[in-house]
Amino acid sequence: MANGNNPRLRPVPKKGGQAPVWRHNKNTGDPCSWGDIDLSTFRGAVDAVTKGGGAIMFGLTSDGGAYSVCVLQDTDKMKEYPHNVEECEDLLRSLIEWYVDLKL
């Protein structure tokens, strides 16, 4: 089932195997874009996490109103949803510092 050209619509699963219904997302703010993130901070976080043996995944929330960052390390999983560029870059810098302090 396609949602046409409207990215603000998303399926909501129904219980009991019924077909999903489409509803409007409620985010009215500016959409997030990874292109707005400082490249050296982004690359530094990827480098620090992967050199430390972890994995890092990036995305956006379904309404586009927040970034999605997931870090996997051994059996641990951390998910964060910063809502703007400043919060996202702060999170990425924190990851760099944390992995550097580990000296992995």
Image: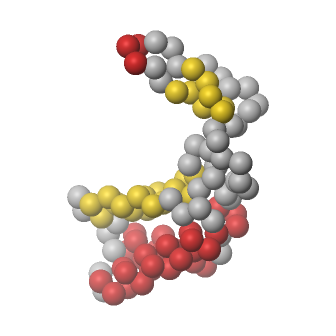
Of 55 and 34, nearer the camera is 34
What x and y, as percent, mark residue 15? 40, 18
What x and y, as percent, mark residue 70? 43, 58
What x and y, as percent, mark residue 28? 71, 48
In the image, taking residue 65 as reference, residue 90 lies left or right, namely left
Question: Does the rendering let one see residue 69?
Answer: yes
Of 1 and 82, nearer the camera is 82
What x and y, as percent, mark residue 83? 59, 62
Q: Quadrant of residue 6?
A: top right
Of 90 and 76, nearer the camera is 90
Q: Identify whether 18 is placed above or below 69.
A: above
Q: Quadrant of the N terminus?
A: top right
Q: Quadrant of residue 98?
A: bottom left
Q: Quadrant of the C terminus?
A: bottom left
User: Residue at point 55% right, 53% down?
Assistant: 59
Q: Residue furthest right?
A: 5
In the image, taking residue 23 as reference, residue 90 lies left or right, namely left
